[in-house]
Image (cartoon, rainbow, N blue to C red):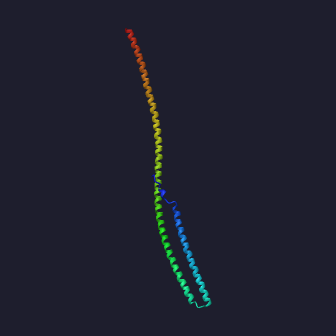
């Protein structure tokens, strides 16, 4: 495992990237809200004008035509805004789908990491057991080595003792042979 799979991961965390996307969506929605507020302000302005005209009782046909044109223009702008909002909602749904897929993949990765951690723990336990066994075997071998040294030393001592006794017996035998030879001669 020479490769580091985390090296390919983005610099920002998953949560930071998701929240950044939501912040951009919030900013867009704030822009849409601002435009709606502007439309509301225009409607309020039109309402105010209409109330002034009704209060004065002027002939309002040309004013009504202008107001109607302004309302139509505002309606078109509202339609455009609604289309943009619908587009934003579609993009948000796509983002939510991608986030769900990413969450699923993260869950799978977490499961695999958990399994790997379990296997590593088992291996660590086995290695610790092997170390203990190795230490026990090493102690046994050391003890066997001591016993073998002791037995070999004992055997060599016995052999040397036997050789010394044999030399002594041989010297005694040679001395007796020499004495017998001198008596016979």
Q: Nearer the viewer, residue 134 or 79?
A: 79
Q: Nearer the viewer, residue 137 or 64?
A: 64
The C terminus appears in which quarter of the rendering?
top left
Residue 30: image x %, image y %? Answer: 56, 72
* Total marks placed: 0
Answer with left or right where residue 161 lies relative to residue 53: left
**Vertical side of 49 occupied by 96: above or below:** above
**Vertical side of 24 occupied by 151: above or below:** above
Q: Nearer the viewer, residue 27 or 108?
A: 27
Answer with left or right where residue 54 lies relative to residue 95: right
**Vertical side of 75 occupied by 131: above or below:** above
Q: Nearer the viewer, residue 47 or 170?
A: 47
Residue 183: image x %, image y %? Answer: 39, 9
Image point 46% across, 65% down: which residue? Answer: 101
Residue 116: image x %, image y %? Answer: 46, 54
Q: Residue furthest top?
A: 185
Image point 40% across, 12% down: which residue? Answer: 178
**Vertical side of 50 occupied by 108: above or below:** above
Residue 85: image x %, image y %? Answer: 51, 74
Image point 49% across, 56% down: which residue? Answer: 7
Image point 53% across, 70% down: which residue? Answer: 25
């Amino acid at each position: 495992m020479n490769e580091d799979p985390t090296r390919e991961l983005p610099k920002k965390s998953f949560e930071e990237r998701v929240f950044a996307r939501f912040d951009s969506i919030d900013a867009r929605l704030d822009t849409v809200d601002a435009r709606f507020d502007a439309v509301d302000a225009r409607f309020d302005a039109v309402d105010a004008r209409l109330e002034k005209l009704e209060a004065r009782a002027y002939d309002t046909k040309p004013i009504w035509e202008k107001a109607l044109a302004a309302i139509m223009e505002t309606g078109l702008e509202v339609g455009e805004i609604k289309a943009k909002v619908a587009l934003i909602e579609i993009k948000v749904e796509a983002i939510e789908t991608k986030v769900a897929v990413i969450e699923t993949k993260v869950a799978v990765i977490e499961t695999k990491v958990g399994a790997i951690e379990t296997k590593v723990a088992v291996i660590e336990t086995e290695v610790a057991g092997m170390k203990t066994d190795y230490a026990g075997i090493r102690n046994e071998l050391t003890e066997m080595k001591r016993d073998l040294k002791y037995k070999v030393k004992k055997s060599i001592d016995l052999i040397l003792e036997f050789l010394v006794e044999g030399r002594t017996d041989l010297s005694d035998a040679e001395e007796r042979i020499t004495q017998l030879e001198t008596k016979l001669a």
